[in-house]
Image (tube, helix red, strand yellow):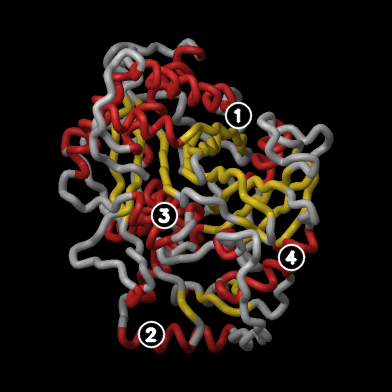
Amino acid sequence: MPSRLSALDASFLYLEEATTPMHVGGVAVFDRPDDGFDYDRLVELIEQRIALVPRYRQKVRHVPGNLARPVWVDDPEFDIAYHVRRSALPRPGSEEQLTELVGRLMSRPLDHTRPLWEMYLIEGLAPAADGRGGDGGRVAILTKTHQAMVDGISAIDIGQVILDVSAEPRDTPDELWMPRPEPTDGQLVLDAISEAVTRPTEIVDNVRVAAGDALATVGKLAGAAGKVLNMARTAGRRAPGLPLNAEISTQRRFAMARTDLEDYRKVRAAYGCDVNDVVLAVIAGALRTWLMSRGEPVAGSSSVRALVPLSVRGEGDVPSSATGGSLGNRVASFLVDLPVGEPSPLVRLHQVTHQMREHTDTGDAVGADTLVRIGGFAPPTLHAVGARAANGMARHFFNLVVTNVPGPQFPLYAAGARMLEMFPVVPLAKGQAVSIGLTSYDGGVYYGLNGDRDAMGDLEVLAGMVDESLEELLETLRQTPMTPVRGDDR
């Protein structure tokens, strides 16, 4: 019998609309090696590694009459050249051109008649201002994966399996793939009826969800899989009315910001907080300046409510080799009021730290080092889990989603090409004009800002204010003696 989608995964298929495509992505920038890195080399690498992610050669088949949830079946016409594509930037291959292309590519929905993923090799990116990329320049790889394929932290993304810890690619066994015969409509119906004998309410539930009540289902199931931990006073209030919430279009903008992880560690050590607290305080400062640049009223009590998903341990969870080192799909979604009305960067940090400690003092939160150890480099997967939590909540409860995923602090490679940077692309929920994802990797912290094209015409302005906000916090260190304090060191 084919593998059936979970109720939560199926809900993301039903929830998808033209304005809210349900795919998560990432933009990885690579230093082109001396012997080159081209489309053929990437395709060869994918062909060698795709056996590690069998779902990527499967497509979704719907059961006639929606008598049961859809199933995963092998795609007998799987065409890797369709899924792995190439593009090139016009000279000079600037980052502005890269972000414009990423925005356009992420705006396009995936083809639901094929496996739900795409990868783009983007050539022609000029060397970085700091000289990285050398004479060979740089290339970027953009991945798009539907959230229905990401079943939790245990899932593996195609972007992960192409990466190695050294420039010498690891050996992978050759595999002759023979697709299993695709079931007929009659077989799918018989399987659904067989399941209904043991679970008679299953057919009614599936028809109801497919008919349009997917939002209620995803909220219920996402709430069960990833609990929402908040103080009652926070969850009981609507989010402030801000330009961050708007009716969104089908088109997107993308912007990037890059910062140094060591700067966050300095602030963490000085003020006894976690790196994630510093990140949220930096975002609060950037949002404050951005709102003021727009002429928006910013009073002392003004705030922006962020949905901040963090991985947590369930009772009795002990990651081990027996469980594949996975924590499963357990995410606590914290509502944090970012104090954009507060002019002092240090007071903003203290206020954010206080809120996060009230949320995480239960001891359930999983530390950054644990996530890296059990998941390897899994930003696309973990950012998708955060996006799921956003779609499972009523949109009037928060203004934007902030996902922060730690990565390894050593270089990774794809077919000998060193990965320099990784920027996440977190999808927008309905009514959300912008989402912010960030990933720490090899000494850097990389922000990816995904915004609606119409509502966020100044998205690059907001991205530019991230570095300014971090500098504000660093300036406080020059005025305050540093006392090392133990905390999350990423």
Q: Residue at the location (48% across, 38% down)?
A: 445
Residue labelled with disc 3? 385
- Residue 114: x and y in percent read 65, 68
Crowd rating for badge 3 (residues with CA inside 10 Å; few <14, some 14–19, many 20+): many
At mark 3, the secondary structure is helix
Residue 148 vs residue 408, the one in the foreground: 408
Mark 4 vs mark 3, foreground winner is: 4
Residue labelled with disc 1? 454
Residue 14 visible somewhere in the drawing:
no
Q: Quadrant of residue 51?
A: bottom right
Residue labelled with disc 4? 43
The residues bearing labels 2 and 4 have C-alpha atoms spaced at a distance of 40 Å
- Residue 264: x and y in percent read 39, 32
Residue labelled with disc 2? 195
- The disc labelled 4 sits on which kind of residue? Val
Q: Earlier in the sequence, mark 2 or mark 3?
A: 2
Residue 380 vs residue 481, the one in the foreground: 481
